[in-house]
Amino acid sequence: MTKKLFIKTYGCQMNVYDSDRMTDVLAPLGYAPVASADGADMVILNTCHIREKASEKVFSELGRLRIMKDKARDQQGRDVTIAVAGCVAQAEGEEITRRAPWVDIVVGPQTYHRLPELVSQIDPAARQRAVDTEFPEEVKFDQLPGEHAPRGPAAFLSVQEGCDKFCAFCVVPYTRGAEFSRPVDGVMTEARRLVASGTRELTLLGQNVNAYHGEAADGASWSLARLIRELAEIDGLDRIRYTTSHPLDMEDDLIT
């Protein structure tokens, strides 16, 4: 039986990519995406923590979801799973469980590949929640399913996460962790799958994307420029973009 999944995405393009991948992760459990929270069996708020107001918006939305959850249980006899993912979950996991005890799952941006396991852990009757905001040793991208739903003519592709700059105004190092570059083979494989499913434009994503130095199969370290040149050889891929870059990591080979 198909179960309805609604994901509300806040913030950056990386969160859009992560939301798409959450859909892929939950598909084997029978979840299919829908356009509204009304009637959904699971609602995920994929959150952004870059501004304080964004965080408070999440708690406001959780208040509305509580009403929906109670109504579904009392009037329809069904349980609605509420999950908070993303950077607010990473930064304020304990606060979420304190202020919104009706939330079933709290999962950070580095552990959403564990969503199927977390879904199996919750028990609405016993109010048993599942919380996972670790920075795990295993690489998230290695755990994600290879296949994914078609993204359309333009798609995001995450190649780098985290940041080591620790700017005074920015929470990224605390919510996304240290800089990490995906291995070249993983990026190329996902890019080819996207193009084969109809994508013609790829936007390469990273909190500090031009710090990319992914390891190739031969052990060599590839810069973002070299990765782009290799991606450009994929037949059917017409355009490549990237965001977000940092001036300290802008190298000559990326602009020449």
Image (cartoon, helix red, strand yellow):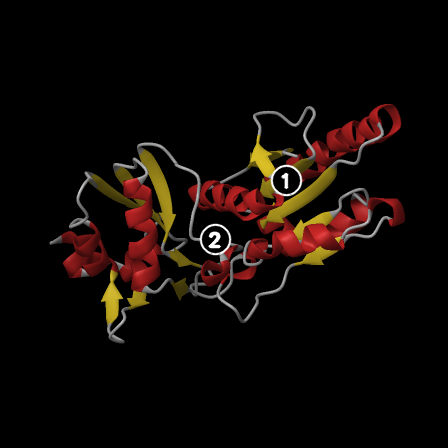
Q: Are marks 1 and 2 in contact (CB under 8 Å)?
A: no
Amino acid at circle 1: Ile
Q: Position of residue 95 (x, y in %)?
A: 75, 51
Quadrant for residue 77, please give it.
top right
Question: What residue is at 29 percent from the left and 61 percent from the top?
Answer: 249
Left or right: where does residue 152 sit relative to residue 16? left
Question: What residue is at 68 percent from the left and 24 percent from the top?
Answer: 38
Up the image or down, 175 lies above or below 10; here it is below
Residue beneath disc 2: 145
Question: What residue is at 70 percent from the left and 34 percent from the top?
Answer: 41
Q: Position of residue 67 (x, y in %)?
A: 80, 28
Residue beneath disc 1: 44
Q: Residues within 10 Å of mark 2 (few under 14, many from 20)?
A: some
Left or right: where does residue 228 sit relative to residue 87? left
Q: Circle 1 sits in a helix, a strand or a loop, which is it?
A: strand
Image depth: mark 1 or mark 2 in front: 2
Quadrant for residue 26, please give it.
top right
Amino acid at circle 2: Pro
Q: Position of residue 184 (x, y in %)?
A: 30, 62
Tell me the quadrant of the picture where the N terminus can be found. top right
Q: Residues within 10 Å of mark 1 (few under 14, many from 20)?
A: many
Q: Is residue 48 visible?
A: no
Q: Position of residue 256 (x, y in %)?
A: 11, 54
Q: Circle 2 sits in a helix, a strand or a loop, which is it?
A: loop
Q: CA distance from mark 1 to mark 2?
A: 19 Å
Up the image or down, 235 lies above or below 65; here it is below
Quadrant for residue 6, please give it.
top right
